[in-house]
Amino acid sequence: MNENKFYSFLGIIKKSGNLISGYNICEIEIKKNKCKLIIIAEDASLNTKRKFVELCEKMNIKYIVYGCKRKLGICIGKDETSVMGIENDDMSRVVLDMLK
């Protein structure tokens, strides 16, 4: 998998309006069952990882732990982000396929 392609695609998803980022907004959207895939940064705090893994499993939402906060943030125009959510089925499938 080409890492640059992965991060570029996240930027495209953001521009399309199908990507959300940030702890609070992701938590809210997961509870509304709007997210199709959650991406958690590898260097996110243990509590953040635990909370989102449990929430995703409870709501039956796919999740991956990948990348660092800085790279995930930069690709969507932020400094850092620990958690992001993809709200489109097709785009979430493409992201998962990239990581296979």
Image (cartoon, rainbow, N blue to C red):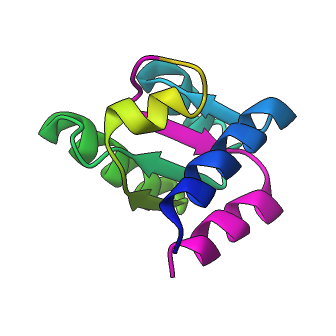
Image position, residue 77 (x, y; %) = 59, 21
Instruction: Judge whether residue 45 can be spotted in this image.
Output: yes
Rendered residue at 52%/75% (across/down):
1
In the rendered view, would you say 63 is above or below 51? below
- Residue at 52% x, 37% y is 84
**Residue 95 highlighted magenta (yes or no):** yes
Q: Name the residue at the bottom extreme.
A: 100
79 displayed left or right of 28: left
Q: At 36% across and 30% down in the image, what residue appears?
A: 70
Number of numbered tags placed on the structure image:
0
Residue lying farthest to the left in this orientation = 46
* Magenta range: 79-100
Residue farthest to the right, as pictured = 16
The image shows residue 45 at horizontal and vertical percentages of 17, 34
- Of 97 and 23, nearer the camera is 97
Using residue 41 as the reference point, say whether residue 5 is left or right of it: right
Q: 84 left or right of 50?
A: right
**Picture residue at 70% right of the left edge, 69% below the top:** 93
Q: Relative to the observer, which residue lies in front, 45 or 78?
A: 78
Where residue 64 sits, quadrant-wise, is: bottom left
Q: Is residue 82 visible?
A: no
Is 80 in the magenta? yes
Side of 92 relative to 73 (left or right) = right
Where does residue 26 sit, x and y in percent of width and height?
53, 31
Taking depth in this image into account, of 13 and 33 the one nearest to the observer is 13
The x and y percentages for residue 44 are 24, 37
Q: Is residue 87 above or below residue 94?
A: above
Residue 47 vs 86, above or below: the answer is above
